[in-house]
Amino acid sequence: MRLLLIIVMILSLLGTAQAAVYCRNGRTAVPYAKLADFLGKKYKEAPTHLGISGTDFIVLFTNKEKGTMTIVTVTKGLACVIIAAEEWHYNVPAENLFDPEL
């Protein structure tokens, strides 16, 4: 449901005059600043981790209080949502990664 809301927001930000740019997963890319603003306002998520892969950036947005997270890639200022999830856990020991009680 949360991912669907993010996709709807992305489509509404594009408008009709702008040519759509698509992500590798088929979703529509949006300007990074607009997506970051949306995630901050709607889910209180902020960028907490950044990785670099060639010319792409991978950004992890999290809300520690609610346990939500969104992973996006950014290429030339355009962001693509890879995944959005709930029940994000911090500092989980490797031996507990697949513990169904988490």
Image (cartoon, rainbow, N blue to C red):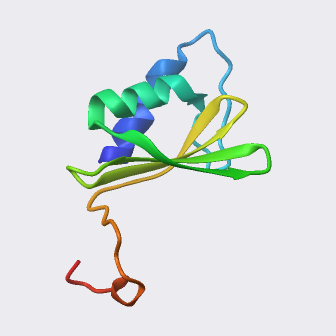
71 shown above or below 78: below
Near-viewer residue (58 or 3): 58
Residue at the spot 62% in from the left edge and 9% down from the top edge: 17
Near-viewer residue (34 or 93): 93
Picture quarter with the C terminus: bottom left
Furthest toward the top, the residue is 17
Q: Position of residue 63 (x, y in %)?
A: 30, 46
Q: Position of residue 1 (x, y in %)?
A: 29, 48
Residue at the spot 28% in from the left edge and 31% down from the top edge: 42
Q: Could you tell whether 22 is left or right of 83 in the image?
A: right
Q: Position of residue 61 (x, y in %)?
A: 42, 45
Q: Give residue 38's quadrant in the image.
A: top left
Q: Position of residue 56 (x, y in %)?
A: 72, 45
Near-viewer residue (23 or 68): 68
How many numbered markers are drawn? 0
16 shown above or below 61: above
Furthest toward the bottom, the residue is 95
Q: Could you tell whether 35 is left or right of 41 in the image?
A: right
Q: Give residue 93's quadrant in the image.
A: bottom left
Q: Give residue 78's quadrant in the image.
A: top right
Residue at the spot 30% in from the left edge and 27% down from the top edge: 41
